[in-house]
Amino acid sequence: MNISVMNQAMPPTTLSVKSRHVAVVGAGAAGLVAARELRREGHSVVVFERGHEFGGTWVYTPQVEPDPLGLDPNRPIIHSSLYSSLRTNLPREVMGYIDFPFVTRPGENRDPRRYPGHREVLLYLKDFAREFGVEEMVRFETDVIKVGILGDGKWKVRSKKSSFNDNNEIISKSNAEFDDEVYDAVVVCNGHYTEPRVADIPGINLWPGKQMHSHNYRIPEPFRDQVVIVIGSSASAVDICRDIAPVAKEVHVASRSVADETYTKQPGYDNLWFHSMIDHAHEDGAVVFRNGKTVLADLIMHCTGYKYHFPFLDTKGIVTVDDNRLGPLYKHVFPPALAPYLSFVGIPWKIVPFPLFEFQSKWIAGILSGRITLPSQKEMMEDIQAFYSTLEDSSIPKRYTHCIGQSQFEYNNWLAAQCGCQGVEKWREAMYSMASENRRLRPEMYRDEWDDHHLVLEAYEDFIKYPSASNL
């Protein structure tokens, strides 16, 4: 999506700098860099992390939730959506934070591949936390129960110590008391990969087969000799259909983003087909696609994304989620009526996440200190309404409000201009584009074959200026 409603960049002002007491919710990739940037700006920071280690969604667990579709609101939540075989779908040079390059690091358990497995990403995040002393700001195994605004504009954060059962599911300690604290500001970094979205399929309630969401997929073995339908066309669907094809009897991929007549067999596979979207399901076990084909399936796997979910956040109705539009948010970060003391990091999707988190965090930190100014509440709301109108005029559904795709680099550079810092490197933007095209042309081999060697050299020449990379 190439949508942009960026205002003229405003350079940082020379106002007196203030130190705020700030709560950060979550110690994943967004929370880690938010904590670092807030402390760099001189703020006092406490990070709440319900798990027992850094990493958020990058912490792999073989455990899955008892509700395979993830629709039961009372189910124990498994935070991670990682599957065992997952490798990054972006090259490591592109993925890393701007001033802490994601280079190959020494160690017998490190993954040197350019598109490494998920464990290497987790180790990188732990390296980042260690390098910048983030751990001393984090309260592990601490679940945020409620975040609410007080009469004086400050925020009350209610938390409770959590622990884990034998299945590595987070449970609250029955004897733990609530801990209430007051903060000047709250930065929400809790991720958005735990509350599944599922496809609406006519007749599915009478269909006798099994259903699950990719959030609860880990390994292919449970699907041996089964006929599986995978719904989706994004990264998880592309990976998972190929992961299970070697053991499944048949794999059929359904996508709403292709023409209704679509029906193709994937080259190199004897049992993998691509279809248009499912039209309806029958109580006899049949699933009918819009292309007219019918499949008797054992299981439907929804690789259909996630919903924004903030069960702990009470804004008195000021911030809402409507068809996966979180709003109103100025530049996907600040609710105007509560700015700058409530903010969100990591809401946009179809992006290179870590650098975007970094630019958002710099902006939030600078605004909280008074070094950078926001427009008035009225001006921010007008900007949001103009953005919504642009989406509507372009017939872009509400649920794609935060899908910024190719506009991410313009967005990041706008944030950088606000902060008075360097924007996205030209090589990073070019490498992202070439990697995306390579993934389209070589869906089976893009992680191990590429043609952007000149950009890799340029990246590593750039990395030399950062101490964390230059001494490796």
Image (cartoon, rainbow, N blue to C red):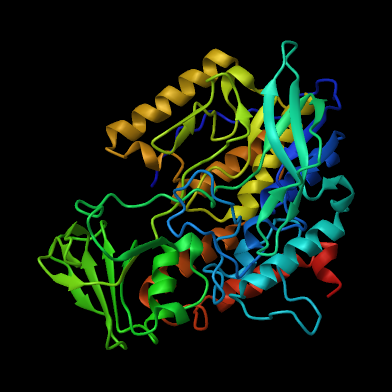
Classify residue 18 as left or right of residue 280: right
Residue 129 image position (x, y, % from top left): 81, 57
Q: Residue furthest front?
A: 175
Please tell me whether residue 189 is drawn above or below residue 452 in the rendered image. above
Please tell me whether residue 262 is drawn above or below residue 360 in the rendered image. below
Residues 451 and 408: in front is: 408
Classify residue 109 as left or right of residue 197: right
- The answer to whether residue 300 is seen in the rendering is yes
Classify residue 360 as left or right of residue 319: right
Please tell me whether residue 72 is drawn above or below residue 334 in the rendered image. below
Residues 21 and 6: in front is: 21
Residue 100 image position (x, y, % from top left): 76, 60
Q: Residue at x 49, y 83 (%)?
A: 449
Q: For residue 334, what is the image quadrant?
A: top right
Please tell me whether residue 133 is drawn above or below residue 432 in the rendered image. above
- The answer to whether residue 371 is seen in the rendering is no
Q: For residue 301, what is the image quadrant?
A: bottom left
Q: For residue 14, what is the image quadrant?
A: top right
Residue 81 image position (x, y, % from top left): 55, 61
Q: Residue at x 12, y 65 (%)?
A: 291
Residue 350 image position (x, y, % from top left): 47, 53
Q: Residue furthest top?
A: 151
Classify residue 93 as left or right of residue 400: right
Quarter of the figure that contains the C terminus: bottom right
Q: Residue at x 47, y 56 (%)?
A: 67
Q: How many marks?
A: 0
